[in-house]
Amino acid sequence: MAIALAVFALVLAIVLGAYWVVIVRPESGEQQTIRRRLRPKRVTQLLAKLEKDREALSAVGPVDTVLVRLAGLSTPLQRMVTQSGLQVTVGTVVLGSIFFGMAAAVLTAFVTPYALASFVVGAIAASLPIFFVKWKAEKRLMKFEEQFPEAIDLIARALRAGHAMPAALQMVADEIPAPVGEEFKRLFDQHSYGMSLPDALRAFGDRVTLLDARFFVTAVLTQREMGGNLSEVLDKLSLVIRDRFTVKRQVRVVSAHGRITGVVLGFLPPATAGVIFLTSPNHLRLLTDDPIGHYMIAGAVVLQIVGVLAIRKIVDVEY
Protein backbone atom coordinates (compact mmCIF):
# COMPACT_ATOMS: atom_id res chain seq x y z
CA MET A 1 0.00 0.00 0.00
CA ALA A 2 2.81 2.40 0.85
CA ILE A 3 4.60 1.60 -2.41
CA ALA A 4 1.41 2.32 -4.36
CA LEU A 5 0.98 5.70 -2.64
CA ALA A 6 4.60 6.60 -3.29
CA VAL A 7 4.29 5.66 -6.97
CA PHE A 8 1.07 7.72 -7.23
CA ALA A 9 2.68 10.76 -5.61
CA LEU A 10 5.72 10.45 -7.87
CA VAL A 11 3.60 10.23 -11.02
CA LEU A 12 1.46 13.19 -9.86
CA ALA A 13 4.56 15.28 -9.17
CA ILE A 14 6.00 14.43 -12.62
CA VAL A 15 2.72 15.38 -14.35
CA LEU A 16 2.27 18.66 -12.44
CA GLY A 17 5.94 19.54 -12.91
CA ALA A 18 5.71 18.96 -16.63
CA TYR A 19 2.50 21.01 -16.80
CA TRP A 20 4.17 23.91 -14.97
CA VAL A 21 7.30 23.79 -17.14
CA VAL A 22 5.51 23.40 -20.47
CA ILE A 23 2.36 25.57 -19.99
CA VAL A 24 2.24 27.70 -16.83
CA ARG A 25 5.76 29.11 -16.94
CA PRO A 26 5.69 30.21 -20.62
CA GLU A 27 2.24 31.81 -20.19
CA SER A 28 3.41 33.68 -17.08
CA GLY A 29 6.46 34.98 -18.94
CA GLU A 30 4.32 36.16 -21.84
CA GLN A 31 1.92 37.94 -19.48
CA GLN A 32 4.79 39.73 -17.78
CA THR A 33 6.17 40.78 -21.17
CA ILE A 34 2.76 42.14 -22.19
CA ARG A 35 2.44 44.05 -18.91
CA ARG A 36 5.86 45.63 -19.41
CA ARG A 37 4.87 46.71 -22.91
CA LEU A 38 1.53 48.12 -21.78
CA ARG A 39 3.08 49.93 -18.80
CA PRO A 40 6.29 51.56 -20.02
CA LYS A 41 8.38 53.66 -17.70
CA ARG A 42 6.96 56.99 -18.84
CA VAL A 43 3.37 55.79 -18.25
CA THR A 44 4.33 54.60 -14.79
CA GLN A 45 5.84 57.99 -14.05
CA LEU A 46 2.73 59.74 -15.32
CA LEU A 47 0.47 57.60 -13.15
CA ALA A 48 2.72 58.30 -10.19
CA LYS A 49 2.22 62.02 -10.74
CA LEU A 50 -1.55 61.63 -10.97
CA GLU A 51 -1.74 59.64 -7.74
CA LYS A 52 -1.92 62.22 -4.99
CA ASP A 53 -0.78 61.60 -1.47
CA ARG A 54 -2.64 62.82 1.55
CA GLU A 55 -3.31 66.52 1.26
CA ALA A 56 -0.82 68.31 3.47
CA LEU A 57 -2.42 70.26 6.29
CA SER A 58 0.60 72.57 6.51
CA ALA A 59 3.81 73.27 4.62
CA VAL A 60 5.67 73.10 7.92
CA GLY A 61 6.46 69.49 8.78
CA PRO A 62 6.03 69.61 12.60
CA VAL A 63 2.79 71.58 12.30
CA ASP A 64 1.45 69.08 9.77
CA THR A 65 2.30 66.20 12.11
CA VAL A 66 0.50 67.83 15.02
CA LEU A 67 -2.58 68.60 12.93
CA VAL A 68 -2.72 65.02 11.64
CA ARG A 69 -2.71 63.74 15.23
CA LEU A 70 -5.46 66.23 16.12
CA ALA A 71 -7.76 64.94 13.40
CA GLY A 72 -10.87 65.69 15.43
CA LEU A 73 -10.07 69.40 15.28
CA SER A 74 -8.29 69.66 11.92
CA THR A 75 -10.81 67.68 9.85
CA PRO A 76 -13.74 70.15 10.25
CA LEU A 77 -11.39 73.06 9.66
CA GLN A 78 -10.00 71.38 6.55
CA ARG A 79 -13.53 70.86 5.23
CA MET A 80 -14.27 74.52 5.88
CA VAL A 81 -11.12 75.63 4.04
CA THR A 82 -12.03 73.41 1.09
CA GLN A 83 -15.53 74.85 0.94
CA SER A 84 -14.22 78.41 1.11
CA GLY A 85 -12.13 78.00 -2.05
CA LEU A 86 -9.19 79.86 -0.47
CA GLN A 87 -5.71 78.80 -1.54
CA VAL A 88 -4.50 78.30 2.02
CA THR A 89 -3.80 75.33 4.24
CA VAL A 90 -5.21 74.43 7.62
CA GLY A 91 -1.82 75.15 9.15
CA THR A 92 -1.91 78.69 7.77
CA VAL A 93 -5.27 79.33 9.41
CA VAL A 94 -4.15 77.84 12.72
CA LEU A 95 -0.86 79.75 12.79
CA GLY A 96 -2.66 82.93 11.79
CA SER A 97 -5.10 82.48 14.67
CA ILE A 98 -2.24 81.95 17.12
CA PHE A 99 -0.38 85.02 15.81
CA PHE A 100 -3.42 87.32 15.92
CA GLY A 101 -4.38 86.08 19.38
CA MET A 102 -0.93 86.56 20.88
CA ALA A 103 -0.42 89.95 19.22
CA ALA A 104 -3.79 91.24 20.43
CA ALA A 105 -3.19 89.91 23.96
CA VAL A 106 0.26 91.54 24.16
CA LEU A 107 -1.02 94.89 22.87
CA THR A 108 -3.92 94.80 25.31
CA ALA A 109 -1.52 94.00 28.16
CA PHE A 110 0.35 97.24 27.40
CA VAL A 111 -2.91 99.22 27.55
CA THR A 112 -4.46 97.67 30.66
CA PRO A 113 -3.03 95.68 33.58
CA TYR A 114 -6.02 93.32 33.71
CA ALA A 115 -5.15 89.82 32.55
CA LEU A 116 -8.81 89.00 31.90
CA ALA A 117 -9.11 91.79 29.34
CA SER A 118 -5.98 90.56 27.54
CA PHE A 119 -7.35 87.03 27.49
CA VAL A 120 -10.74 88.10 26.11
CA VAL A 121 -9.26 90.36 23.41
CA GLY A 122 -6.73 87.67 22.46
CA ALA A 123 -9.46 85.03 22.18
CA ILE A 124 -11.57 87.31 19.96
CA ALA A 125 -8.58 88.14 17.73
CA ALA A 126 -7.61 84.46 17.48
CA SER A 127 -11.08 83.57 16.23
CA LEU A 128 -11.02 86.16 13.43
CA PRO A 129 -9.17 84.00 10.81
CA ILE A 130 -11.53 81.08 11.47
CA PHE A 131 -14.60 83.28 11.19
CA PHE A 132 -13.21 84.76 7.97
CA VAL A 133 -12.76 81.29 6.46
CA LYS A 134 -16.27 80.35 7.59
CA TRP A 135 -17.69 83.53 6.07
CA LYS A 136 -15.96 82.83 2.76
CA ALA A 137 -17.27 79.25 2.80
CA GLU A 138 -20.85 80.38 3.43
CA LYS A 139 -20.59 83.04 0.72
CA ARG A 140 -19.22 80.51 -1.75
CA LEU A 141 -21.98 78.02 -0.95
CA MET A 142 -24.61 80.72 -1.45
CA LYS A 143 -23.17 81.50 -4.87
CA PHE A 144 -23.01 77.78 -5.66
CA GLU A 145 -26.67 77.41 -4.72
CA GLU A 146 -27.58 80.25 -7.07
CA GLN A 147 -25.67 78.74 -10.03
CA PHE A 148 -26.58 75.11 -9.39
CA PRO A 149 -29.93 75.02 -11.28
CA GLU A 150 -28.19 76.31 -14.42
CA ALA A 151 -25.64 73.49 -14.16
CA ILE A 152 -28.39 70.89 -13.77
CA ASP A 153 -30.21 72.29 -16.83
CA LEU A 154 -26.98 72.04 -18.84
CA ILE A 155 -26.51 68.41 -17.79
CA ALA A 156 -30.11 67.59 -18.73
CA ARG A 157 -29.72 69.20 -22.18
CA ALA A 158 -26.45 67.34 -22.76
CA LEU A 159 -28.07 64.01 -21.86
CA ARG A 160 -30.99 64.67 -24.21
CA ALA A 161 -28.48 65.45 -26.96
CA GLY A 162 -26.97 61.99 -26.54
CA HIS A 163 -23.88 62.78 -24.47
CA ALA A 164 -22.73 60.50 -21.66
CA MET A 165 -22.79 61.63 -18.05
CA PRO A 166 -19.00 62.27 -17.83
CA ALA A 167 -19.16 64.42 -20.96
CA ALA A 168 -22.04 66.40 -19.45
CA LEU A 169 -20.02 66.96 -16.28
CA GLN A 170 -17.11 68.22 -18.38
CA MET A 171 -19.43 70.68 -20.15
CA VAL A 172 -20.50 72.10 -16.81
CA ALA A 173 -16.88 72.38 -15.71
CA ASP A 174 -15.96 74.27 -18.90
CA GLU A 175 -18.99 76.55 -19.32
CA ILE A 176 -20.20 77.41 -15.81
CA PRO A 177 -18.06 79.88 -13.83
CA ALA A 178 -16.76 79.28 -10.32
CA PRO A 179 -17.66 77.94 -7.85
CA VAL A 180 -19.92 75.46 -9.68
CA GLY A 181 -17.42 75.01 -12.49
CA GLU A 182 -14.58 74.33 -10.05
CA GLU A 183 -16.51 71.67 -8.14
CA PHE A 184 -17.69 69.89 -11.29
CA LYS A 185 -14.17 70.02 -12.72
CA ARG A 186 -12.91 68.31 -9.61
CA LEU A 187 -15.72 65.76 -9.93
CA PHE A 188 -14.85 65.11 -13.57
CA ASP A 189 -11.11 64.85 -12.82
CA GLN A 190 -11.69 62.35 -10.02
CA HIS A 191 -13.75 60.18 -12.34
CA SER A 192 -11.22 60.53 -15.17
CA TYR A 193 -8.32 59.51 -12.92
CA GLY A 194 -9.93 56.22 -11.96
CA MET A 195 -12.51 56.88 -9.26
CA SER A 196 -15.88 55.35 -10.03
CA LEU A 197 -18.69 57.78 -10.82
CA PRO A 198 -20.79 56.84 -7.74
CA ASP A 199 -17.80 57.38 -5.43
CA ALA A 200 -16.96 60.69 -7.15
CA LEU A 201 -20.56 61.84 -6.76
CA ARG A 202 -20.58 60.91 -3.08
CA ALA A 203 -17.34 62.86 -2.57
CA PHE A 204 -18.99 65.78 -4.38
CA GLY A 205 -21.93 65.59 -1.96
CA ASP A 206 -19.56 65.57 1.02
CA ARG A 207 -17.68 68.66 -0.21
CA VAL A 208 -20.77 70.67 -1.09
CA THR A 209 -22.84 70.59 2.07
CA LEU A 210 -26.07 71.71 0.43
CA LEU A 211 -29.34 69.84 0.41
CA ASP A 212 -29.70 70.57 -3.31
CA ALA A 213 -26.36 68.90 -4.07
CA ARG A 214 -27.43 65.82 -2.14
CA PHE A 215 -30.69 65.77 -4.12
CA PHE A 216 -28.64 65.78 -7.32
CA VAL A 217 -26.33 62.99 -6.15
CA THR A 218 -29.27 60.88 -4.99
CA ALA A 219 -31.12 61.37 -8.28
CA VAL A 220 -28.13 60.34 -10.41
CA LEU A 221 -27.25 57.33 -8.25
CA THR A 222 -30.87 56.17 -8.15
CA GLN A 223 -31.14 56.43 -11.93
CA ARG A 224 -27.94 54.42 -12.40
CA GLU A 225 -29.29 51.62 -10.21
CA MET A 226 -32.98 51.64 -11.13
CA GLY A 227 -32.99 53.17 -14.62
CA GLY A 228 -35.30 55.84 -16.00
CA ASN A 229 -35.16 59.13 -17.84
CA LEU A 230 -32.44 61.07 -16.03
CA SER A 231 -32.87 64.23 -18.09
CA GLU A 232 -36.53 64.49 -17.09
CA VAL A 233 -35.63 63.91 -13.43
CA LEU A 234 -32.98 66.63 -13.58
CA ASP A 235 -35.45 69.06 -15.17
CA LYS A 236 -37.86 68.58 -12.28
CA LEU A 237 -35.01 68.79 -9.77
CA SER A 238 -33.89 72.09 -11.28
CA LEU A 239 -37.42 73.46 -10.95
CA VAL A 240 -37.62 72.34 -7.31
CA ILE A 241 -34.24 73.94 -6.51
CA ARG A 242 -35.30 77.24 -8.09
CA ASP A 243 -38.52 77.23 -6.06
CA ARG A 244 -36.59 76.50 -2.87
CA PHE A 245 -34.15 79.29 -3.67
CA THR A 246 -37.04 81.72 -4.19
CA VAL A 247 -38.58 80.73 -0.86
CA LYS A 248 -35.21 81.12 0.85
CA ARG A 249 -34.84 84.66 -0.48
CA GLN A 250 -38.34 85.53 0.75
CA VAL A 251 -37.55 84.10 4.19
CA ARG A 252 -34.36 86.15 4.39
CA VAL A 253 -36.29 89.31 3.50
CA VAL A 254 -38.94 88.64 6.14
CA SER A 255 -36.39 87.77 8.84
CA ALA A 256 -34.00 90.65 8.02
CA HIS A 257 -35.37 92.86 10.81
CA GLY A 258 -34.93 90.11 13.39
CA ARG A 259 -31.38 89.35 12.26
CA ILE A 260 -30.36 93.01 12.42
CA THR A 261 -31.94 93.28 15.86
CA GLY A 262 -29.98 90.25 17.02
CA VAL A 263 -26.70 91.72 15.75
CA VAL A 264 -27.34 95.08 17.46
CA LEU A 265 -28.38 93.51 20.77
CA GLY A 266 -25.42 91.14 20.61
CA PHE A 267 -22.73 93.75 20.04
CA LEU A 268 -24.20 96.69 21.98
CA PRO A 269 -23.37 95.57 25.57
CA PRO A 270 -19.71 94.57 24.95
CA ALA A 271 -19.16 97.63 22.74
CA THR A 272 -20.57 99.91 25.45
CA ALA A 273 -18.43 98.24 28.09
CA GLY A 274 -15.34 98.64 25.89
CA VAL A 275 -15.99 102.35 25.32
CA ILE A 276 -16.54 102.95 29.05
CA PHE A 277 -13.40 100.98 29.85
CA LEU A 278 -11.32 103.16 27.50
CA THR A 279 -12.85 106.52 28.41
CA SER A 280 -13.68 106.14 32.12
CA PRO A 281 -12.10 102.99 33.56
CA ASN A 282 -12.96 104.07 37.12
CA HIS A 283 -16.64 103.42 36.44
CA LEU A 284 -15.89 99.73 35.93
CA ARG A 285 -13.62 99.26 38.94
CA LEU A 286 -16.63 98.35 41.05
CA LEU A 287 -17.12 95.28 38.84
CA THR A 288 -13.48 94.42 38.26
CA ASP A 289 -12.19 94.94 41.82
CA ASP A 290 -15.08 93.49 43.82
CA PRO A 291 -15.46 89.66 43.86
CA ILE A 292 -19.22 90.05 43.52
CA GLY A 293 -18.62 92.10 40.38
CA HIS A 294 -16.78 89.14 38.85
CA TYR A 295 -19.88 86.99 39.33
CA MET A 296 -22.02 89.75 37.82
CA ILE A 297 -19.75 89.93 34.75
CA ALA A 298 -19.84 86.15 34.34
CA GLY A 299 -23.63 86.13 34.66
CA ALA A 300 -23.97 88.95 32.14
CA VAL A 301 -21.77 87.10 29.64
CA VAL A 302 -23.78 83.90 30.05
CA LEU A 303 -27.11 85.71 29.65
CA GLN A 304 -25.74 87.57 26.63
CA ILE A 305 -24.75 84.30 24.95
CA VAL A 306 -28.13 82.74 25.76
CA GLY A 307 -29.93 85.76 24.33
CA VAL A 308 -27.93 85.73 21.10
CA LEU A 309 -28.53 82.01 20.63
CA ALA A 310 -32.27 82.46 21.31
CA ILE A 311 -32.55 85.26 18.74
CA ARG A 312 -30.60 83.20 16.23
CA LYS A 313 -32.94 80.26 16.78
CA ILE A 314 -35.97 82.50 16.22
CA VAL A 315 -34.75 84.05 12.97
CA ASP A 316 -33.38 80.75 11.59
CA VAL A 317 -36.57 79.68 9.84
CA GLU A 318 -36.62 76.25 8.22
CA TYR A 319 -37.96 76.26 4.67
Image (cartoon, helix red, strand yellow):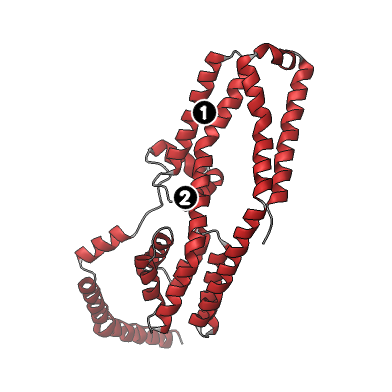
Query: What residue is shown at x 49% (from left), y 31% (from top)?
Result: 98
Q: Residue 35 location in percent, x, y?
A: 25, 73
In this image, 28 relative to 106: left or right? left
**Neighbour class for label 1 at 10 Å: few (<14), some, many (≥20)?**
many
Say which amino acid is labelled 1: Gly
Residue 294 drawn above or below residue 196 = above
Q: Residue 116 location in percent, x, y?
A: 63, 21
Q: Which residue is mark 1?
A: 101
**Neighbour class for label 2 at 10 Å: few (<14), some, many (≥20)?**
many
In this image, 24 relative to 224: left or right? left
In this image, 248 relative to 88: left or right? right
Q: Residue 274 location in percent, x, y?
A: 63, 23
Q: Residue 81 location in percent, x, y?
A: 47, 48
Q: Secondary structure at mark 2?
A: helix
Nearer-N-terminus badge (2/1): 2
The answer to whether one can see residue 239 in this image is yes
Q: Nearer the viewer, residue 301 or 19?
A: 301
Query: What residue is shown at x 38% (from left), y 64% (from top)?
Result: 185
Quadrant in which residue 36 is drawn: bottom left
Residue contact at pointers 2 and 1, CB within 8 angstroms: no
In this image, 114 relative to 27: left or right? right
Q: Nearer the viewer, residue 278 or 165?
A: 278
Query: What residue is shown at x 55% (from left), y 14% (from top)?
Result: 111
Say which amino acid is labelled 2: Ser
The answer to whether one can see residue 203 in this image is no
Quadrant in which residue 240 is drawn: bottom right
Q: Nearer the viewer, residue 100 or 312?
A: 312
Q: Which residue is mark 2?
A: 84
